[in-house]
Image (tube, rainbow, N blue to C red):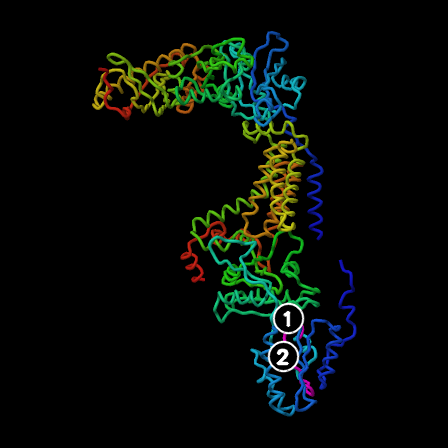
Amino acid sequence: MRIGRSLKRAKEKPTTDGTLLCEVSENVKRLMKELGHSSDLSVRMIESPHQKSVKAAVIHLDGLADGNIINENIVNPLIQWFKENNQTLTEMEERASHILTVSQVTVKESWQEFLSAVLTGDTVVLLNGSTKAFIASTKSQPSRAITEPTSQTVIRGPKDSFTENLRTNTSLIRARIQNPDVRLESLKVGSVTQTDIGIMYIQGIADESIVEEVKERVKGIDIDGVLESNYIEELIRDDSATIFPLLLNTERPDAVVGNLLEGRVAIIIQGTPFVLIVPAIFSQFFQSPEDYYQNQYISSFLRMLRFGAFFLSMYASAVYLALVTHHQGLIPTTLLVSLMGQRENVPFPAVVEILVMEMAFEILREAGIRMPRAIGPAVSIVGALILGQAAVEAGFVGAAVVIIVAISAISSFTLPNTSLVNVTRGIRFMLIFISAFIGLYGILLFTLCIWLHMSSLRSIGVPYFTPFAPFRLKEQRGVFFRFPLPSLLKKSSRK
Amino acid sequence: MKMNISLVWMAAICLLISGCSNYRELNELGVIIAMGVDQNDDPKQPYQVTYQVINPSGLSQTSTSGGQSLAVINYTITGKTILETLGKSASVIPRENNTTHLSLIIIGEKLARNNLDLVFDGLDRGKYSRGSIPIFIARGKTAKDVLGVIEPLETTLGKNIISTTQNNQKLYGSSSEVLAYEIISSLLSEGKEASLPGISISNDSQKGKQTENLETTNPTTIKVKGLAIFRKGKLVRWLDGETARAAQFVTSKVKNTPVVLPCERGNVTINTIGVKSKMLTAIHHEEPVIHTDINVMGELLETSCEINLSDPRVLKKFEKKMENVLKKQIKRTISITQKEKSDIFGFGDALSRTNPVYWRQNKKNWDNLYSDAQVSLKVHVDIINSGLRMEPYESK
């Protein structure tokens, strides 16, 4: 909900253009005015003891710039310099970049560049009488330490994950591919936030048309602010209505590097540890980086297990419901008898029973994510005990329903990517409704619809359902199995 | 967008028009698991059908309501046709009847002796039950009586009968499960007569129908007893014990069965572990000749004579002996069926394949031809081992 006005309309007077003035105090005043006398703007005036008109202003935004560097490498040398010498302005302009002992000093004259340098955390030195701004790079954004990934964990494999800092993230990737062909292109998205976005790929491996397409789409984004990678994802994906994730997101640097090596493009966004990878195909969402860090047989088994779990998670409740309410003849007699026994005292229709349990699980899950950490144990005890056991004993639901809902919930968590977990949740509910109406026939119909829908999807122009549609038998083996590295390497070198 | 909207419409129509077409809750279902068909004395309502319905609360372990109730309930209904009784059953069974789990059909002997021909039509025609239901004849009893026994070991009677039969087929072989579609095809066939396993009640008493039956170690139970052979859809004779087993040898439906052979001071038991038979027919001087080739593999598993089993000649001797015993048994069985003019083995079918022209001319007369046909038998026995011991232990 927007409370204020749109910034575009509010900003009618074009004040940010023009160049710097000669008078340093005028520049400072103008800056103060434009930033609305922000309290975190720090301006240090240094005057020459020899000559009153020789002075400099050291300007930075407190918190974004590194205070130590400013003190030792900017303010201190300037004071010393002013003390020792009595120079003319032109001499000073020439020598200023030598005096400032920081890694990078650029000289700019436009007001706009001066302003954006201050806002990004650089320190700007203005000299009285000069229209030049000496921009010393002192960016030091507050950032979290690199920690273990929280949403995509592995047992064997790298334990670092991205942070909210774009530079840290690119450095994590760079550290893994020390190759001159790695390209990083920077863009700014968000008319208000001016969020930094890095597009990373490997020149020569990545398809250039895809790189261009990604750049075009990211540049074309018109939005006030970008707070998370999903903003970008939703704005550049090919189909805005689909439930399926069309872009892969990961917080693992090794996953990004693996995908870069396969010729994909990574989109890194300042402020979020989730990096987008395009183009993504459906089968990628079943692959964990760990598949390549352990024995191929186990990896192949686990890959197939994930596919099985994916289907189980979507279909278990719906198929159970269909069998119990429409196709009792398909249940083995012994099981039917025990199911009938469980149902004898349950007052609700089977579909209500299933929905109640599914909703209860969704509530539990949502609560588990949102609640304060300290309450966690209490909720899990209440959730597990009350929903699991007591509900059955109280006759709210049958024991079989609890098992079915539990297995469909747990199997969804075998998927390495949470976007896909959310897909299973959505589809599961739709399937339950349909199967309550028309049983297995409906399940089949809906499956067909989903299949058709998936075949029509594209991710940055690449068919989402490759290698099934378009049908490429040779690539399909990589979907269900993880072949030993020697055979994988042989294949890629032949290409 | 138009596409999407039309999809939504299609989905909505699919869902809403169908409604909850077949939606049935489990606790609204009366699942019929066994059916007994008897002949009724009233000629206006010739069928008396017993439906055995599952009582879920009697079977479920989770139900906490006190007092043990029985696993099944029998409802007996009379009617003109079997399907009519199913319809009528709605007036006594409080739940919607469901025959998808029907797993046992028992025919009363009286009905079987009278006529079995078109009893199964409704079953074969109906959409809601399978053709793979085993069928039994209640020997000397009515189907209602047999279904009335409260089975102590298995949870339901149907399961008990079926598993007993399968067990029998596996480990003794005097009878085998005959499924509905098999019996229909043999009733239909001109070259094969039907044969059905019989069941009866052992240790019969009034208690068998009450829960008391569960409280004794010597309860009334169901036993599989004999093989009923039919002629033109009518039960004509029972085969028992070894005679019945010999019939299973011809059709190689038996696999493991002990064959007891006499020796000097006792008996030797040879367990067959594989039986392969081949039915051959030929025409000799315008007369059909029936030939059966039976290959049996066996293990010598018990002996009460002192014989040296390490000597292959001894085993050879027993092979010969067993061949003769089996030959005698099988010959007797075949001659019984010939006497009853009931070709339960399907020699006629075999003949129709080997000599179609002859078959077409004579199939009407097959009963008589069969009963006069020459029979030749070839039995070959291989004893492949004699167990873990060589010599029998000697008592000192």
Comes first in the chain, label 2 or label 1? 1
Q: Which residue is mark 1?
A: A64
Q: Which residue is mark 2?
A: A135
Q: Residue A231, relative to residue B121: is it above or below?
A: below
Region rendered in magenta:
A118-131
* Residue B346 drawn in magenta: no
Q: CA distance from mark 2 to mark 1?
A: 14 Å
Q: Residue A125, relative to residue B216: is it above or below?
A: below
Q: Quadrant of the N terminus of chain A?
A: bottom right
Q: Quadrant of the C terminus of chain A?
A: bottom left
The dot on residue A85 is none
The residue at 71%/37% (across/down) is B17
Marked residue chain, label 1: A
Q: Residue A139, relative to residue B263: is it above or below?
A: below
Q: Secondary structure at mark 2?
A: strand
Marked residue chain, label 2: A
Residue A385 quadrant: top right
B325 on left or right of B361: left
> Which residue is at the front of the view, B372 or A74?
A74
Residue A487 on image: x %, y %: 41, 56
Q: Nearer the viewer, mark 2 or mark 1?
A: 1
Residue B317 quadrant: top left
* Residue A126 drawn in magenta: yes
Residue A170 on image: x %, y %: 55, 66
Which amino acid is tagged 1? Leu
